[in-house]
Amino acid sequence: MAFLPPSTNHEYRGADVSVVFLGLCAVLTLVPGAIHSFLPDGGAGVIAHLDVGGRAALVRALFACEGATQLAFGLGMMAVALRYRPLTPLFLALVVVERGLMSLQGWVLLPPPNGHHPPEHFASPVTAILALAFLALALRPGRR
C-alpha cells in the first residue's frame, strides 16, 4: 500500500479555477504557518505588533500551535489541489468556515486591545467571500 492513494483528479467535474484558488489558499496558509512555527516570536511582535510584555513564552507557544494547524491544513489543501480534486468543494467549505470564524473573532468578538489589526484580519473576510464564490463554481456540474 502506498502512502498516498492514486490521484482522483480525473473524477473532478467543477471549475478548474476553483482548484487553482484552493492551491493559492494552500500556499497562503503554509507561509503564515511557517512564520508562526519558526519565527523566534512567531510573528507576534514583528508582524502583529503585539505587546506581549512578560507573557512572551505563552504567546510564542500559542502562535506555534496555530502555526502547526496551519501547516497541516495547508498541506491537506495542497494535496487536494494537486491529487484529489473531487474534495475541492469540501476543502473550500472548510476555508469558508475557518475564515468566517477568523473574521468574526478578529472584528467582532475579540478585536485587538491596542486597535492594531494584523494583516490576517483584513485578508480573512475577503478570503471567506472568495472561497464561497469558488465553492459555488466547484459545485456546478461542468465538464465530463
Image (spheres, rainbow, N blue to C red):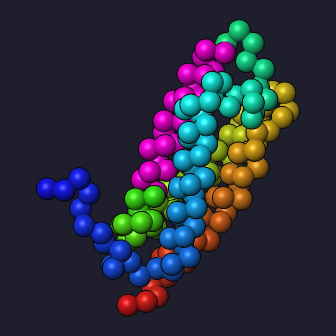
Q: Position of residue 129 (x, y in %)?
A: 67, 63
Where residue 113 appears, as percent x and y from the top left, is: 81, 27
**Looking at the picture, how far across and down is residue 78, in whole percent?**
45, 58
Q: Quadrant of residue 67?
A: top right
- Residue 96, given in percent of the width and then of the height, sits at 57, 57
Residue 93 on the magenta span: no
Total residue callouts: 0
Q: Is residue 134 above or below residue 70?
A: below
| Nearer to us in this view, 83 or 124 | 83
| Residue at 25%, 67% in the rendered image | 6
- Residue 101 vs residue 9, the one in the foreground: 9
Q: Residue at x 23, y 53 (%)?
A: 3
Q: Which residue is most to the right?
A: 115
| Magenta region | 56-77
Whether 2 is drawn above or below 53: the answer is below
73 shown above or below 92: above
Residue 108 visible? The answer is no
Q: Is residue 91 visible?
A: yes
Identify the residue shown where x is 59% and y is 46%.
31
